[in-house]
Amino acid sequence: MATLEGAHVRITSDSFKDGKPMPSSHSSDGEGSLPPLDITDIPSRTVTIAITAHDPDIPRDRRPDGNFDHWVVWNLPRDTTHVASATEHGGTVGTTTIGTNDWVAAGPPPGDGPHRYYFTVYALDSELDLPESTTRAELEAAIAGHVIESAELMGTYER
């Protein structure tokens, strides 16, 4: 799919609109599934796609940087337009904040107010040779200079 004049890569979900609450089915209060993600307007120069999901609203007494990485995946095929689950996508999954190589469902502390969950898609000009121990910060460092375009989708969740 070629990028249309003036179009830029986009990431959306049928489960929630940008800036709106995510259904509890994507949280630890529900089934904990990854929200289905749709990627459109992928630039024609794209070689691979990477996606990260993180929550920047973690209480500082729990994590000094305030971030929790929920999902890190790269080397998705360039023609990936839909990610229906955290396990069926053709990419390599990196390490979350809790040290797993899987999607970690939204689960903010009860009473902490709404947390924001940023899903970021990156259209990259190369394939990445990274170990599965790669974190979001390490992925972001590795893709510096290789991002053709990126886009974000943000959903909220609170308990």
Image: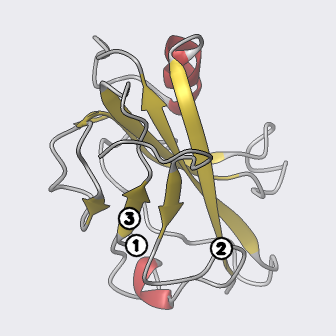
Tell me what residue is drawn at x 31 percent, y 29 percent: 48
Q: What residue type is labelled 3?
A: Asp
For the residue carrying disc 1, how many other residues have a C-alpha within 10 Å: few (<14), some (14-19), or many (20+)? Answer: many
Q: Disc 1 on helix, strand or loop?
A: loop
Tell me what residue is drawn at x 28 percent, y 25 percent: 132
Q: Is residue 59 visible?
A: yes
Q: In this view, does 75 lie to the left or right of 53?
A: left
Please determine whether, in this image, residue 142 is positioned above or below residue 11: above
**Residue carrying label 3:** 38
Front residue of this view, candidates 38 and 113: 38
Q: What residue type is labelled 1?
A: Pro
Q: Which amino acid does label 2 sit on?
A: Asp
**Residue carrying label 2:** 18
Please determine whether, in this image, residue 157 is positioned above or below residue 57: below
Q: Is residue 10 left or right of residue 77?
A: right
**Disc number at residue 35?**
1
Total labels drawn:
3
Instruction: Report, in whole angstroms, how far the alpha carbon at label 2 lies from the one at label 1.
Output: 12 Å
Residue 30 locus on image (x, y percent): 40, 88
Please determine whether, in this image, residue 138 is positioned above or below residue 13: above
Instruction: Report, in whole angstroms, how far the alpha carbon at label 3 lies from the one at label 1.
Output: 10 Å
For the residue carrying disc 2, how many other residues have a C-alpha within 10 Å: few (<14), some (14-19), or many (20+)? Answer: some
